[in-house]
Image: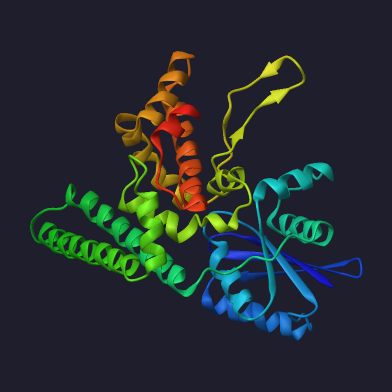
Amino acid sequence: MEFVGIDIAKKKFDLAWLSGGKLRSKVFDNSPAGHHALLQWLSKYKLTPENCQLAMEATSQYYEAVALVLFDAGYTVSVVNPLQIKAFGESLMRRQKTDRADAELIARFCEVAKPLPWQAPAPEIRELQRLVARLEAVQGMHVQEQNREHESQGVALESVERVKESLADEIERLKKKIRDHIDSHPGLREQDELIQSIPGVGDIVSSYALAWLRAERFDDVREAVAFVGLSPRHHQSGSSVNGKSSISKLGHGRLRKVLYMPAMNAIRFNAAAQQISERLVAAGKNKKLAIVAVMRKMVHWIVGVLKSGKPFNMNLALAKP
């Protein structure tokens, strides 16, 4: 069996192929053309779905298109928690930090650990992902036009206002399409109702969770927390030097970003979230850390209702702070 590691970035990805003790590297554009070139390259070197396993990290959302292309071509693809790769590198005492070195490390992890194959989402999930990603992009363009409004005058300002209005209309159309898409699939609609039974969670968080935080992909809720990039990172040296704790941020940036404001909202209207926040603030922690703790707990709750198939239970949540 041949093992290939892929280090994903926004605009390109580095590939490392381990073969008979030798290493071959290649860089591709992270674009449809680059994905096609990847398949051609694999075919050229007779790396087939039968004799090749590929692995990549679940870093942000940039891995998704590459993983789907490989999955649809029949390859065994493993999408690995970045913390596992980091720990594996530390066990090898790796010091080099380049994209090429990271791809090699992922390939070696694949060879040693034989991670489980990744399963592509169902067609209705893929469509939801596309709709949510498009809504996010249009909302970004709308914010850009709002910023330009303050620095424009005359005809230029009129143009900005027209574009801003058009983008606002498109945002509403996309929101309706997302709502209609979820409602048209009974499974998605049922999961949406479960997620929104959590006080503080609305349409936006639910649509993102349905698109990317699929409970069946996680054996343990801690895996889901790590996937979002909310695992605590502790800074410690020896027995006497302790730094501030932070979150890893090695995860799905979209999900992490979209949870922040709802977590603040939950602290106001969700008694279990209030309990977490008040306990941490009373212990001397700052409010931002309390918000992150609530974000982490919201991932627990979302995965919990999806796995159990039962609506959010406030009494149970209050009993398990």
In this rendering, would 278 be left or right of 32?
A: left
User: Coloured how?
Assistant: rainbow
Question: Could you tell me if residue 17 is visible in this image?
Answer: yes
Dividing the picture into quadrants, the one containing residue 19 is bottom right
In this rendering, would 100 be left or right of 304?
A: right
Q: Residue 116's x, y, as percent?
A: 72, 62
Given residues 305 and 261, the one toward you in this image is: 305
Dividing the picture into quadrants, the one containing residue 59 is bottom right
Given residues 89 and 264, the one toward you in this image is: 264
Identify the residue at horizontal 24%, vertical 62% (top origin).
Answer: 171
- Numbered circles on residues, count: 0
> Looking at the picture, does residue 4 appear above or below residue 301?
below
> Looking at the picture, does residue 229 appear above or below residue 48?
above
Identify the residue at horizontal 58%, vertical 76% (top origin).
Answer: 69
Q: Residue 24's x, y, as percent?
A: 80, 69
Q: Residue 167's x, y, as percent?
A: 21, 63
Given residues 192 and 310, the one toward you in this image is: 310
Identify the residue at horizontal 18%, vertical 59% (top origin).
Answer: 164
Given residues 298 and 239, the one toward you in this image is: 298
In this rendering, would 18 be left or right of 75?
A: right
> Looking at the picture, does residue 39 appear above or below residue 277?
below
In the displayed orientation, state which residue is furthest to the left: 154
Q: Residue 95's x, y, as percent?
A: 78, 43
Query: What quarter of the picture does the N terminus occupy?
Result: bottom right
Dividing the picture into quadrants, the one containing residue 192 is bottom left
Identify the residue at horizontal 28%, vertical 68% (top origin).
Answer: 180
Question: Could you tell me if residue 321 is visible in this image?
Answer: no
In this rendering, would 225 be left or right of 89?
A: left
